[in-house]
Image (cartoon, rainbow, N blue to C red):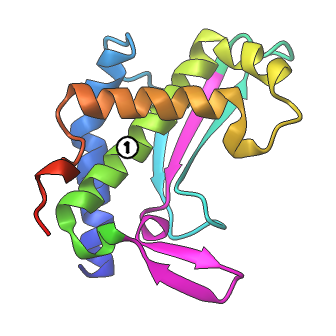
Amino acid sequence: MTKKDILSLTSEIINKNTPVILNKLGFKEQPGYLKFKISESYDDALGMCFAIFKDDEKTQLQEAVIILYPFNMLWINFLDWIRLPRICKFSRRLFERKVLHVLAHELRHFWQYYTGEHKKYSRLSRFLPSKMRLIELDAEKWAEDFLTVYGLKPRIANLSF
């Protein structure tokens, strides 16, 4: 896939699946203050959800921006100079599933900020590494459950060697 293909496919996945995921999270429609951006790269992040609140207590969400980094979904970076391809680099279907997984994960973070759940998690896991924080574990589990329910999880058991 070319760079243009990757950006176009990522945009298509966002537009097609955001309403479905938001509905599953309890939203009737996409809030006007939720924005999406597709960017080339940021460290080794696959996606991020930034939240801006109206108040210091972080109870009223003013704006949220979800950024997806599809090129990071194709490569694993080691030591700033070694890049190895991920398996989804060789399969459009696996790439689509990876983008959808990251989108569901980041929309779960949006839900956490919208509902105030983020406050509960931050106090409990402040001193853990970022990948082990409860807010991340919740988003990861929810995204996996979403993909399983919608039959989008790859079926590795069906592959023959």
- Closer-to-camera residue (131/122): 131
Against 161, residue 23 (above or below) is above
**Quadrant into which the C terminus falls:** bottom left
Q: Residue at x 73, y 10 (%)?
A: 59
Spot occupied by residue 122 in the image (x, y as percentages of width and height): 79, 23
Q: Residue at x 42, y 63 (%)?
A: 70
Against 59, residue 102 (above or below) is below
Label 1 crowding class (10 Å Cα cut-off): few <14, some 14-19, many 20+? many
Q: Residue at x 65, y 27 (%)?
A: 135
**SS majority, magenta:** strand
- Quadrant location of residue 85? bottom left
- Write the start and end of the magenta stretch as one range: 62-86
Where disc 1 sits, the SS reads: helix
Against 45, residue 136 (above or below) is above
Q: Badge 1 is on which residue? A: 101
Spot occupied by residue 137 in the image (x, y as percentages of width and height): 59, 31
Side (left or right) of 79 relative to 139: right
- Closer-to-camera residue (48/78): 78
Side (left or right) of 14 relative to 132: left
- Closer-to-camera residue (34/155): 155
* Residue 70 visible in the displayed image: yes
Q: Residue furthest bottom?
A: 81
- Quadrant location of residue 38? bottom left
Q: Residue at x 44, y 26 (%)?
A: 142
- Quadrant location of residue 147? top left
Spot occupied by residue 101 in the image (x, y as percentages of width and height): 37, 43
- Closer-to-camera residue (86/5): 86
Side (left or right) of 31 relative to 121: left
Indicate whether residue 74 is drawn in magenta. yes
